[in-house]
Amino acid sequence: MASKIDLIKNLEQELRKGTLVLAVLSQLKEKHYGYSLVERLNDKGLIIDQNTLYPLLRRLDKHGILESTWEMVEPRPRKYYQLNKLGRDILRDLTQTYYEQHETVDTLLKED
Amino acid sequence: MELLERYLRQIRRYLPFKDREETVSELRSLILDQLDEQTASGQDQTEALRNILIDMGAPRDVALRYVEKGPLISREMEPIMLLVMKIVAITLPLVILFANSIAFVTDTPDFTFSDVLVNLALMIPSALYSMIVAIGMVFIVFVLIERFASPQFEIEQKPFNPDLLPELPNKLFKVSIAESVAAIFFTTLLIYLFNFQQGLVGIYYEGEQFPLLNENFDRILPFLNIGWFVAIVLNIYFLFRQKKTIGSRTVEFITKIYGAVVAILLATSDIFNDVIIEGYDLNFLPNTFKYALLFIAIASIIGAIVEYIKMFINLDNLETAMEQQAETKKKSSQS
């Protein structure tokens, strides 16, 4: 059996995973490249590992909800990501779902 | 900066073919962004890069995050599977050979020792065959376990050390100019000799000249010409591009296999002029020629296949990596 610390770590990770996508999408209303997005999320208190973020960006891009472009900005080309129309719609729906769920869970937690 | 390229090169190996270059370019740009920031705050560039790479983790781990499906066999499961494969590979053929020998001895009342040996030799192919099938089955079983049981392992985490990254490729995709020029020169010579001056290949005796090869050779000559022609074109292309690509190496591979097949054809056809062979008592020549050529052809088929597979798995890099590892081990045991 896993230790209590491991168990908590695992469950926390799962809890984070769901909101992570939402957090990333929320920042992609503006155009970002990978590193600037890590910085920005970190600044706002969401610590995200690059190894999680970069593949996530790639997956979202593959799902067709982001628009990606290579742009030559000194000193090197960078790949920029931004929500497209579908992405913005999805973000709106997800945000709605998030608030609803948050409210429900909140009530449940405060029951006793 | 060479360290970064070595790192990316290892990541590339584990990435899916699709979008491979794209992912690598993006990672390069992201790592450099991070490096810029750290060097701006006064850190030494080499040291900063090392730390960034250690932070990112081992190439295989980084690459696997870009693969939607996990590996068929996880790295924790791999040693267990290999162990089972080794056990099967050793025991199964022995069991089959042993059981078969017992059956042979009991079925044949008046056997001699050499009978048993002959029977044993005849069984070797099927023992090997069953070994291959069994190894395949073990693999399938492990893939299924991995897919449906996905066992968890507790293993010690080894820290990733960027210094152990293999060097950048040396010879795999490089064109040796001398080699290409020599190949073009000699191939042209062969085409000229066999197509236009076949008479020169023969026996000279008392001012007379007898051709060494007969009309069977002339029938095979067009096949030879095709191979030679492709070889010349390919080498000119190599000289022109100064580097080999997966595509041109594939053509090179096919040409080599083709050449070896034609060589086998040549070895198994009777291409020598009987008059000469018998007249000059050269009976050893056709046989020597046949076996030497067969040997060369098979060796070159094996060599070509190995070279070609090596391109995909970078065996030469693996070797240098292992050497480096051995060295660091030595150093750490000394200290």
Image (cartoon, coloured by chain):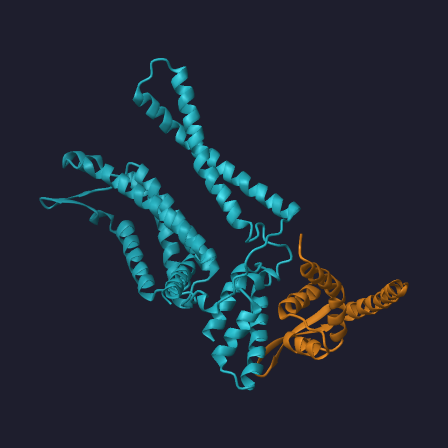
Chain B pictured colour = cyan
Q: Is residue B151 left or right of residue A12?
A: left
- Up-down: is B87 above or below B26? above
Quadrant of the frame with the C terminus of chain A: bottom right
In which quarter of the view is residue B318 placed?
A: bottom left
Residue shown at 34%/62% (left/top)? B180
Chain A pictured colour = orange
Camera-side residue of B154 and A77: B154
Residue shown at 55%/38% (left/top)? B137
In which quarter of the view is residue A71 placed?
A: bottom right
Q: Is residue B229 left or right of residue B44?
A: left
Answer whether residue A70 is visible to the viewer in this image. no
Residue shown at 57%/62% (left/top)? B61
Q: Position of residue B26 (x, y in %)?
A: 59, 71
Q: Position of residue B21 (x, y in %)?
A: 56, 66
Camera-side residue of B103 and A87: B103
Q: Total number of numbered labels?
A: 0
Q: Is residue B312 left or right of residue A42?
A: left
- Up-down: is B259 above or below B168? above
Q: Residue furthest top?
A: B109
- Up-down: is B113 above or below B195? above
Q: Position of residue B334 (x, y in %)?
A: 36, 65
Q: Position of residue B116 (x, y in %)?
A: 34, 23
Camera-side residue of B153 and A17: B153
